[in-house]
Image (cartoon, grey):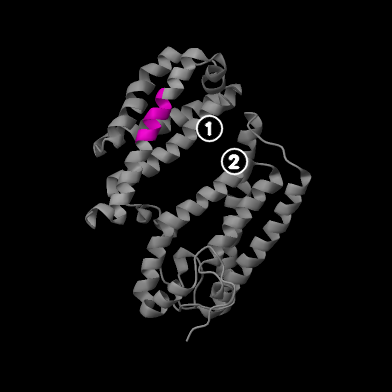
């Protein structure tokens, strides 16, 4: 087998095509189930007329997914907008009527998968640079004191926590509650969540303080450090801030009893790992060269070392 056939771009391309093939098959199976199961029809369509939905969904979702699976890239500019409109429309209907909750959830997941796979099909890779725009663009930190870097980091962390650990999980919880999609679990799970949140928060603050003090910058994209930091929690794990944030997200889901929030946290880990991390590590390699290469070889991104890493 040639190197081109096994390159990352080829693997990403074939993975995207596989996703669209599975989506076409699953959507076809769903339409067949609608014909024979009133329960499936109620759970996914509620009071919507199946004939009217089929008029749009079969050609614009099922057929276009099959065409995308065949590798015809231009069809994504039909498939992505339709899937987004269908997902948002179904969700609006579900929230207004409290019916078709599972249909809403399925279409929202399909929207996420279609957008991600469509972009991979288009670019033959995960186009992380599309996410790193505006305030998320990588920039070197301006010259400032360690205290100024720390205060800037803490301010942005506070905004991050409010948005991603309070507002969005709150919206997800309401979505589950409104559509009766929630799950109940033992109170001990919430207690475990509190402990996990404290652990993640301590790790995040420790990481921020270490980076601000030694890196002459922040862990944030808009003010990247000007020095490679291999100290504090960075001796055990390569990106403790990302690991801490994902831990906090999972913890919030456990605390509020929202299984979708837990999935949201894992989805955030996937986005960071496959879209953001490659761009970030390319930047670090360009700026710090062999030092970062050696560090990356010895310290994992997600699994902490047993013993702290020490530079030679």
* Mark 2 secondary-structure assignment: helix
Would you say the magenta stretch is mainly helix, strand or loop?
Answer: helix
Q: Residues within 10 Å of mark 1 (few under 14, many from 20)?
A: many
Residue lying at 49% horizontally and 26% vertically, measured from the top left: 90
Q: Position of residue 182 (x, y in %)?
A: 66, 34
Up the image or down, 36 lies above or below 230; here it is: above
User: Viewer-proximal residue, 215 or 158?
Assistant: 215
List the single residue furthest toward the bottom: 312
Q: Which residues are magenta?
A: 21-28
Kindly check if marks 2 and 1 are in contact, taking CB atoms under 8 A apart as contact.
yes
Q: Is 241 included in the stretch rendered in magenta?
A: no
Q: In the image, 150: left or right of 197?
A: left
How far apart are labels 2 and 1 at the CA level?
A: 10 Å
Q: Which corner quadrant holds the N terminus?
A: bottom left
Q: Is residue 7 visible?
A: yes
Q: Residue under label 2, please give it.
A: 260
Q: Position of residue 308 (x, y in %)?
A: 57, 77
Q: Which of pointers 2 and 1 lies earlier in the amino acid sequence? A: 1
Q: Is residue 213 above or below residue 197?
A: below
Q: Is residue 119 visible?
A: no
The stretch drawn in magenta includes residue 25: yes
Q: Residues within 10 Å of mark 2 (few under 14, many from 20)?
A: many
Image coordinates of residue 139 in percent, x first then y, are 40, 68
> Which corner quadrant of the image does residue 169 belong to?
top right
Q: In x, y percent, where is residue 164?
A: 57, 51
Residue marked by disc 1:
105
- Disc 1 secondary structure class: helix
């Amino acid at each position: 087998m040639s190197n081109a056939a096994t390159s990352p771009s080829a693997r990403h391309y074939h993975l995207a095509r596989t996703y669209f093939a599975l989506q076409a098959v699953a959507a076809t199976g769903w339409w067949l189930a609608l014909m024979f199961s009133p329960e499936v029809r109620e759970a996914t369509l509620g009071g919507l007329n199946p004939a009217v939905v089929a008029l749009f969904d079969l050609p614009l979702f099922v057929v276009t997914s099959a065409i995308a699976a065949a590798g015809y890239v231009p069809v994504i500019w039909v498939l992505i907008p339709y899937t987004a409109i269908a997902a948002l429309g179904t969700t609006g209907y579900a929230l207004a009527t409290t019916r078709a909750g599972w249909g809403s959830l399925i279409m929202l997941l399909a929207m996420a998968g279609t957008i991600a796979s469509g972009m991979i099909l288009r670019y033959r890779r995960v186009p992380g640079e599309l996410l790193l725009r505006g305030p998320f663009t990588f920039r070197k930190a301006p010259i400032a004191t360690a205290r100024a870097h720390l205060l800037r980091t803490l301010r942005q962390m506070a905004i991050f926590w409010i948005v991603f650990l309070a507002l969005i999980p709150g919206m997800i919880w309401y979505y589950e509650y409104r559509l009766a999609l929630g799950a109940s679990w033992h109170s001990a799970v919430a207690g475990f969540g509190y402990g996990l949140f404290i652990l993640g928060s301590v790790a995040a603050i420790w990481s921020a303080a270490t980076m601000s003090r030694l890196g002459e910058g922040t862990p944030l994209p808009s003010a990247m450090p000007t020095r490679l930091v291999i100290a504090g929690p960075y001796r055990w794990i390569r990106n403790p801030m990302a690991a801490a944030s994902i831990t906090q997200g999972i913890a919030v889901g456990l605390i509020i009893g929202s299984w979708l929030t837990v999935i949201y946290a894992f989805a955030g880990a996937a986005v960071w790992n496959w879209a953001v991390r490659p761009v970030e590590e390319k930047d670090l390699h360009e700026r710090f060269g062999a030092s970062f290469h050696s560090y990356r070889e010895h310290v994992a991104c997600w699994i902490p070392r047993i013993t702290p890493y020490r530079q030679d």
